[in-house]
């Protein structure tokens, strides 16, 4: 299975010591061209080039049909008073994932929360790093990997977010 990946998620995972574990879940990462332009971090770009060389990453060109769907999602999400705002590249990635029927990987809350409030998005899986870690690891190993992920990326998951995923983290 493939997954569409957002810039924030890709950059975060490029720093994680177990970053290649992503490929235990996904055969290929799809980076929309509009998102590719947001990945400016040199380490992340190096990792992106390595994955492209290994044929583990595909770049999706910008397509007007996906643009139309992305604009619709952008408008729906940003019109909501209960959802965080979404930007154009993120809405494009979400639209592409919806159309391809593959997961969307992002560390931004808006797409994940939108699947709970917008009916047409309930059919797309949106995973943040915590969900991916939970899918990869269990038990004590999960707690160790969460700690390592935080050390490597600087991302600290809130107690509320951990409990949403049913993770009791000391």
Image: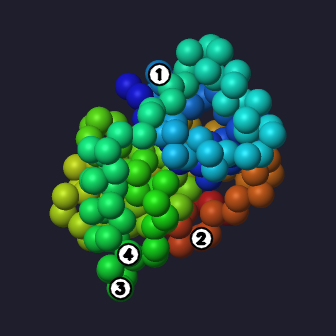
User: Could you tell me residue 138's position as x and y percent?
Assistant: 54, 40
Going by the image, does 169 lie left or right of 138?
right
**What residue did someone put label 2 on?**
159
| Disc 3 from disc 4: Cα separation | 8 Å
Disc 4 is placed on an element classified as: helix
Disc 1 is placed on an element classified as: loop
User: Could you tell me residue 19's position as x and y percent?
Assistant: 67, 33
**What residue did someone put label 1 on?**
27
Disc 2 is placed on an element classified as: helix
**Number of the label disc, if any, that sits on residue 81:** 3
- Mark 1 or mark 2, which is nearer to you? 1
| Disc 4 from disc 1: Cα separation | 32 Å
Task: Give whichever of discs 2 and 4 has the lower sequence position.
Answer: 4
Residue at horizontal 52 percent and vertical 46 percent from the top: 34
- Mark 4 or mark 1, which is nearer to you? 4
Q: Which of 25 and 119 is in front in this view?
A: 119
- Mark 3 or mark 1, which is nearer to you? 3
User: Could you tell me residue 98's position as x and y percent?
Assistant: 29, 45
Number of residues whose C-alpha sits closer than 10 Å to that of mark 4, classed few (under 14), some (14–19) or many (20 or more): some
């Amino acid at each position: 299975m493939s997954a569409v990946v957002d810039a924030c998620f890709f950059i975060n995972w490029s720093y994680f010591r177990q970053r290649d574990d992503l490929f235990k879940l996904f055969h290929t990462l799809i980076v929309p061209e509009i998102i590719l332009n947001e990945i400016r971090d040199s380490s992340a770009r190096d990792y992106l080039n390595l994955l492209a060389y290994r044929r583990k990453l595909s770049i999706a060109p910008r397509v007007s049909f996906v643009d139309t769907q992305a604009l619709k999602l952008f408008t729906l999400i940003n019109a909501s008073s209960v959802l965080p705002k979404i930007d154009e590249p993120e809405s494009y990635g979400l639209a592409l994932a919806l159309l391809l029927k593959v997961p969307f990987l992002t560390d931004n809350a808006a797409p994940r929360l939108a699947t709970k409030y917008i009916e047409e998005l309930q059919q797309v899986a949106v995973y943040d790093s915590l969900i991916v870690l939970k899918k990869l690891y269990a038990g004590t190993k999960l707690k160790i990997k969460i700690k390592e992920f935080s050390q490597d990326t600087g991302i600290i998951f809130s107690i509320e977010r951990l409990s949403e995923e049913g993770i009791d983290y000391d």
